[in-house]
Image (spheres, rainbow, N blue to C red):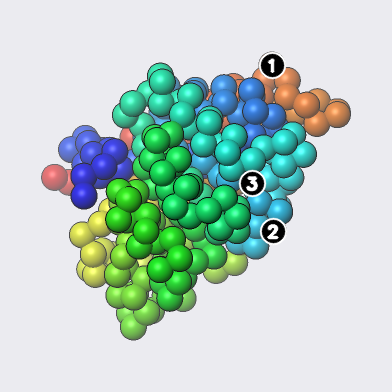
Amino acid sequence: MTTRLTDRFAACATEGRAALVTFVTAGDPDYATAEAILHALPGAGADIIELGVPFTDPMADGIPIQLAGQRALKAGQTLRKTLAMVRDFRKRDAATPVVLMGYYNPIYVYGVETFLKDALDAGVDGLIMVDLPPEEDDELCLPALEAGLNFIRLATPTTDDKRLPKVLQNTSGFVYYVSMTGITGGVIASYDAVGEAVARIKAHTSLPVAVGFGVKTAADAAAISKGADGVVVGSALVEKVRLSLDGSGKATPATVTAVTDLVSELARGVRSVRKAA
């Protein structure tokens, strides 16, 4: 299945570099500001966008993304509004892949069949659902694949060679390797260990492997991109949103540029590493 994701990873590989995958939370800190950030990401250097769907119980996320979700929910963000945001984005950008990342409950409430239709119509390219293991593929993964959406699976340091084939079985688009055990926003203990894990996963699949959790700086991005096909940054970006807000938690004129300035730095880090052909 050829999608915007496969095309973008192929284009980055042709350039001899990893893709920069940026995560932001839909509706954080409000709809208009989040939409402005979304539109600005590609120009700042983002190759792929993960758009977080706010949820009340984000069990895999650290404090920065939890707070981003709370801000978005307080501002009235919903799954329907998130799809509308993607639809508006597509009016200006037909090429940048957009992946929705979140939890199954909002989709279940929305209705799987209706959601998949609306997501495709809006221009969504793929899904990452952190609370749906391979044993639950009938719930959303298989219907999503049949509808034409990529379903990106997470592999972790505890995903051993026995478990890995099961994880990869219905994965498409790319494999998301979580660089550490625990929640988002931690610190990467060893770049070498991450590189070894990526190489082990790539021995089992031809899909690109992107690494996330713990990437905060251009130096982190450069180090990870030496072995990975993509570098995912999320907590550092949503933290930039938080730090830009005024005393009442509202967006300021600095909010959008606080995010895009860091994206530009990260993009330079990724692009500083050239891979052998």
Q: Nearer the viewer, residue 113 or 206?
A: 113
Residue at x 22%, y 68% (from the top left corner): 203
The image's mark for residue 39 is none
Residue at x 31%, y 65% (from the top left corner): 170
Residue receiving disc 2: 57
* View extreme (bottom): residue: 162
Spot occupied by residue 207 in the image (x, y as percentages of width and height): 25, 57
Label 1, secondary structure: give it.
loop
* View extreme (right): residue: 248
Left or right of 52, for residue 12: left
Residue at mark 2 to residue at mark 1: CA–CA distance: 30 Å
The image's mark for residue 253 is 1
Rendering quarter of residue 161: bottom left
Q: Nearer the viewer, residue 29 or 105?
A: 105
**On screen, residue 261 above or below 218:** above
Spot occupied by residue 58 in the image (x, y as percentages of width and height): 65, 57
Residue 52 visible in this rendered orientation of the protein: yes
**Nearest-to-viewer mark from 2 and 1:** 2
Indicate the amino acid at tag 2.
Asp
Indicate the amino acid at tag 1.
Pro
